[in-house]
């Protein structure tokens, strides 16, 4: 509860700071203070200290799963601010509003990770998405940015309509007319067709939000058109939050009717892995490649949705952490590059060895090489599916796709280390590089001791 | 524990001497470990790693591990000394990566926990990828990329197998004892496809036909020191995995598919030997000959007799030493004459007699002439294969394996003749004989060859215990 209130309030503060402070860097500092405050208050929430005691009539439920994910999201955003805060200032003139919108998004993240009723899920998803529509189009002079924003808005509105329809059907199909997720279908094994339709509609709209195929078509254009600094945020924190919402929804309400929808999720997962990995291979721009790679990573995260067992819950926490940290790191470096194509990275190792080394660690983590967090993330996903004993074809298919993913991740490594060239890159400060090094160390540490994060799931103070 | 010191020095330009020093320290530690403590209890280390997955950081130095750790520990100093004069750009990165790969390799041979084994398996791969990509021939990037993806796909299959087995263990753990206890509980059908999951990974590593296509290109394009690591030690990872993790855990699968796998080995042996005869490039020839030798060892594993397994153990060590010796010679020739083509060389024996003598001994060891170490190994493997009850084709296998030995004599002697004897041409007219450090290293190898060839008993003592254990586990009827 702490996080929701503080995020919303701080968003408003940031809006006003845009007017009060003439100096953009003060706005940035204020935002960093805000995110630290958010992170601390969330951890206090995890530890049992609640600042606000508002009776939500059981509409919001704060358990360690949601709060732990909040922590990851806020920590990722903190790192994101520290690394790319200055680049946010460069996007346009309304710097205060950009930060404010990000805080509103974080408020939405907190709601999505702790909803207990479908209405709250709807509010949370909307709070996640609407600021992003604005952020996508924030580079007003760039035609691509405007196009991306419009595309995102139209597709997003459409999917929201589907979600509302699905919620309405589920409401109608429930026995006593309820929105509460835990009363929808617990204990039932046979459900009415109305229920199934509502479920599918809800699944489709959530799949849109997490950019699962075949609902992913907006992702490359939107990620590519948005200012790179906001793509970084969108592709990591927001996607992860949408996933958590997805898993919370299905885990709490539809767990008992698994046979009805598991096959759909399996097909969606296979399509996502296939399309994401295959198209990423052919990209010429690293930014677009990362957009497709985020679709491919979403495919792996969908394993958690497919199985919904302990491994899945632990795994999705680890996966969101590993994926967010690594992608934020890569984007932080990408923002500084002037040339977004693969050839733009040629020779980076010679001129900026530190940047090349940390970039390699992040790429290895995304590829799933041991010693990085990404390996254990993928491991948990595989273990989750293997534990059910079904869907082995999907496991083998995902392994082949993982091998394909190595190709495009390693193209960047090869360009950096093994090709000659002079990379055009903006100036990087020492603090930037040291922040990146810390991030890389975290990724490696999580790869050796994933325990540290997963244990937090089971510390119950609330 | 020996081998777990990850050296990561990126600062000093004296990296060469440091790496040599540290690899010698590793060697001394390994030797002490093997010689002084014959009791298993002293040589293990078990600590918590990931309690949620019940995976422990468990390492132990038992018989098979000893042999391979000894090989690794002996090879790295040899490699460093032999390539001492080679100038690498970014030398410190090169040596740091070499030592990292040594860590990974040691870890593979020592680990007693399946997840840890997989962890080190991949860990050995990454430094080698960078090593092979950054220093080597012109087409090295594509060749190494192929190598990496190939091996990685195989390892992923192995990961699925490991996870599947993990779920079937009684106490849900990755430790090797739990995995060994699985051999009676998994059904035959499951064992069949699990066998293939693991075997594909190991077959790609070894390599066994038809998964060998990455090998000649990668060996040829890498710089020779890296090739020494690849062919001397990394291929043993595949064999090691086969013996330690595949055969005892899935005995029914091994027995069922042993014939198919052996057939693949045989095809690979003959095919590779024939190709080796036709090669003009020294490096590719040695690469193909390596496939043939490993094929024989893999065949012997599937023969599952006491003698053949002992033969494999000792041959793993021997082949490592011999092939490194061969690569050193190839490297010397290439460095002096800047060519590896057989038809451009000739008549070196007149100008470089020491090189010629040492090479001839090593080459004859490769052919497994009596008095050399390889003879012991191959003879045992042959007797094992011939006397094997695991397959009804044992005579066929023995005969075809024998043919491949004859073919190996053909290409080896062919190489000796073309390179050292015959007429010297313009290129080799000014050949200089090898220098002191190279002479010493080659002499060390030759001595090892002859000593183990004449008195192999100590090696057998080391490995007897583990061979018996593994065979007992494989014989599921007991």
Image (cartoon, rainbow, N blue to C red):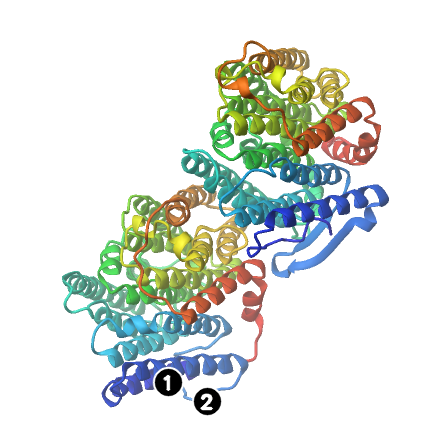
The residue closer to the viewer here, B216 or B392, is B216
Of the residues under marks 1 and 2, which one precedes in the sequence?
1
The residue closer to the viewer here, B325 or A291, is B325
Q: Residues within 10 Å of mark 1 (few under 14, many from 20)?
A: some
Q: Which residue appears at 83% of the width and 41% of the height? A: B35
Using the rendered view, name the quadrant where residue B404 is placed. Answer: top right
Give the residue number, with chain letter if any, for mark 2.
A51
Q: Where is residue B314 in the image (x, y as percent from the top left)?
A: 74, 29
In the displayed structure, B387 sits above or below A330; it is above
Q: Where is residue B412 in the image (x, y as percent from the top left)?
A: 60, 15
Subunit of label 1: A
Q: Which residue appears at 68% of the width and 52% of the height? A: B4
Q: Let me know if residue A233 appears in the view.
A: yes
In the displayed structure, A410 sits above or below A337; it is above
- The answer to whether marks 1 and 2 sit on the same chain is yes
Q: Let me know if residue A122 appears in the view.
A: no
Q: Which mark is residue B334?
A: none
**Left or right position of A460 against A393:** right
Q: Which residue appears at 25% of the width and 73% of the height? A: A131
Give the residue number, with chain letter if any, for mark 1.
A5
In the displayed structure, B389 sits above or below A272; it is above
In the displayed structure, A144 sits above or below B410; it is below
Q: In which quarter of the image is the C terminus of chain B?
A: top right
- Report if the CB atoms under discs 1 and 2 are less than 8 Å apart: yes
Q: How far apart are marks 1 and 2 (CA)?
A: 10 Å
User: Label 1's element?
Assistant: helix
User: Label 2's element?
Assistant: loop
Q: Position of residue A253 (x, y in %)?
A: 41, 66
Q: Where is residue A189 in the image (x, y as percent from the top left)?
A: 43, 58
Subunit of label 2: A
Using the rendered view, name the quadrant where residue B225 is placed. Answer: top right
The residue closer to the viewer here, A72 or A430, is A430
């Amino acid at each position: 509860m702490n996080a929701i209130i503080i995020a919303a309030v701080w968003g408003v503060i940031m809006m006003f700071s845009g007017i009060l402070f003439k100096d953009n860097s003060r706005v940035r500092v204020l935002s960093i203070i805000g995110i630290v405050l958010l992170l601390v208050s969330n951890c206090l929430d995890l530890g049992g200290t609640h600042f606000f005691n508002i009776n939500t009539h059981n509409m919001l439920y704060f358990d360690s799963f949601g709060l732990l994910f909040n922590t990851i999201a806020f920590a990722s955003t903190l790192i994101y601010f520290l690394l790319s805060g200055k680049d946010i200032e460069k996007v346009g003139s309304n710097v205060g509003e950009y930060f404010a919108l990000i805080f509103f998004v974080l408020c939405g993240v907190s709601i999505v990770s702790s909803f207990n009723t479908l209405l709250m899920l709807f509010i949370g998803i909307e709070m996640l998405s609407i600021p992003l529509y604005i952020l996508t189009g924030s580079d007003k002079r760039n035609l691509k940015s405007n196009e991306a924003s419009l595309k995102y808005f139209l597709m997003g509105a459409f999917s929201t309509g589907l979600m509302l329809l699905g919620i309405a059907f589920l409401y109608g199909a429930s026995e006593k007319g309820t929105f509460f997720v835990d009363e929808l279908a617990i204990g039932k094994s046979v459900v009415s067709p109305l229920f199934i339709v509502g479920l599918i509609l809800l699944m489709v709209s959530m799949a849109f939000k997490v950019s699962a195929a075949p609902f992913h078509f907006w992702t490359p254009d939107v990620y590519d058109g948005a200012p790179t600094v906001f793509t970084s945020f969108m592709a990591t924190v927001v996607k992860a939050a949408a996933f958590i919402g997805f898993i919370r929804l299905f885990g709490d309400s539809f767990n008992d009717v698994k046979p009805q929808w598991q096959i759909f999720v399996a097909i969606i997962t296979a399509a996502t892995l296939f399309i994401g990995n295959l198209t990423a291979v052919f990209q010429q721009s690293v930014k677009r490649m990362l957009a497709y790679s985020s679709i491919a990573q979403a495919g792996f995260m969908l394993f958690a949705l497919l199985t919904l067992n302990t491994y899945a819950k632990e795994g999705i926490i680890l996966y969101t952490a590993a994926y967010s940290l690594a992608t934020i790191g890569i984007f932080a470096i990408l923002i500084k590059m002037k040339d977004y194509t693969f050839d733009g990275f040629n020779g980076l190792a010679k001129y900026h060895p530190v940047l090349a080394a940390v970039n390699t660690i992040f790429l290895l983590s995304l590829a799933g090489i041991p010693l990085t967090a990404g390996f254990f993330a993928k491991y948990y996903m595989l273990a989750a599916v293997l534990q059910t004993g079904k869907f082995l074809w999907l496991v083998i298919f995902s392994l082949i796709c993982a091998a394909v993913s190595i190709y495009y991740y390693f193209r960047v490594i090869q360009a950096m280390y093994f090709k000659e060239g002079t990379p055009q890159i903006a100036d990087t400060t020492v603090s930037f590089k040291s922040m990146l090094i810390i991030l890389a160390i975290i990724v490696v540490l999580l790869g050796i001791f994933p325990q540290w994060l997963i244990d937090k799931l089971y510390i119950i103070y609330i | 524990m020996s081998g777990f010191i990850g050296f990561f020095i990126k600062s000093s330009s004296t990296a060469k001497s440091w790496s040599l020093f540290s690899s010698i320290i590793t060697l001394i530690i390994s030797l002490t470990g093997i010689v002084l403590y014959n009791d298993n209890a002293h040589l293990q280390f078990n600590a918590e790693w990931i309690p949620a997955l019940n995976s422990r950081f468990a390492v132990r130095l038992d018989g098979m591990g000893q042999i391979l750790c000894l090989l690794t520990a002996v090879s790295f100093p040899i490699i460093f000394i032999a390539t001492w004069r080679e100038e690498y750009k970014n030398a410190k990165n090169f040596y740091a990566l070499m030592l990292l790969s040594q860590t990974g390799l040691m870890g593979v041979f020592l680990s007693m926990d399946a997840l840890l084994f997989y962890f080190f398996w991949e860990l050995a791969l990454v430094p080698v990828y960078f090593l092979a990509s950054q220093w080597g021939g012109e087409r090295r990037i594509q060749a190494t990329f192929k190598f990496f993806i190939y091996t990685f796909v195989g390892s992923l299959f192995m990961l699925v197998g490991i996870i599947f087995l993990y779920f079937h263990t009684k106490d849900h753990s990755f430790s090797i004892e739990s995995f060994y206890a699985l051999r009676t509980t998994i059904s035959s059908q499951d064992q069949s496809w699990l066998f293939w999951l693991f075997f594909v990974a190991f077959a790609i590593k070894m390599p066994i036909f038809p998964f060998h296509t990455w090998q000649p290109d990668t060996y040829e394009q890498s710089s020779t020191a890296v090739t020494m690591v690849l062919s001397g030690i990394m291929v043993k990872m595949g064999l090691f995995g086969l013996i330690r993790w595949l055969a005892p855990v899935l005995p029914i699968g091994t027995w069922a598919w042993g014939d198919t796998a052996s057939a693949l080995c045989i095809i690979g042996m003959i095919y590779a030997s024939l190709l080796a005869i036709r090669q003009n490039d020294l490096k590719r020839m040695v690469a193909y000959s390596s496939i043939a030798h490993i094929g024989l060892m893999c065949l012997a594993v599937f023969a599952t007799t006491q003698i053949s397994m002992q033969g494999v153990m000792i041959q793993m060590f021997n082949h490592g030493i011999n092939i490194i010796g061969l690569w050193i010679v190839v490297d010397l020739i290439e460095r002096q004459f800047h060519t590896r083509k057989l038809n451009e060389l000739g008549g070196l024996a007149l100008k470089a007699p020491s090189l010629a003598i040492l090479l001839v001994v090593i080459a004859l060891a490769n052919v497994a002439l009596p008095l050399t170490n390889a003879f012991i190994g191959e003879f045992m493997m042959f007797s094992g294969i011939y006397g094997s009850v695991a397959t009804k084709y044992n005579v066929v296998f023995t005969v075809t394996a024998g043919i491949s030995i004859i073919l190996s004599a053909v290409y080896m002697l062919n190489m000796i003749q073309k390179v050292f004897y015959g007429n010297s041409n313009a290129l080799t007219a000014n050949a200089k004989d090898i220098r002191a450090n190279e002479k010493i290293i080659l002499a060390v190898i030759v001595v090892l060859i002859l000593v183990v060839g004449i008195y192999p008993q100590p090696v057998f003592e080391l490995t007897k215990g583990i061979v018996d254990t593994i065979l007992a586990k494989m014989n599921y009827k007991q």
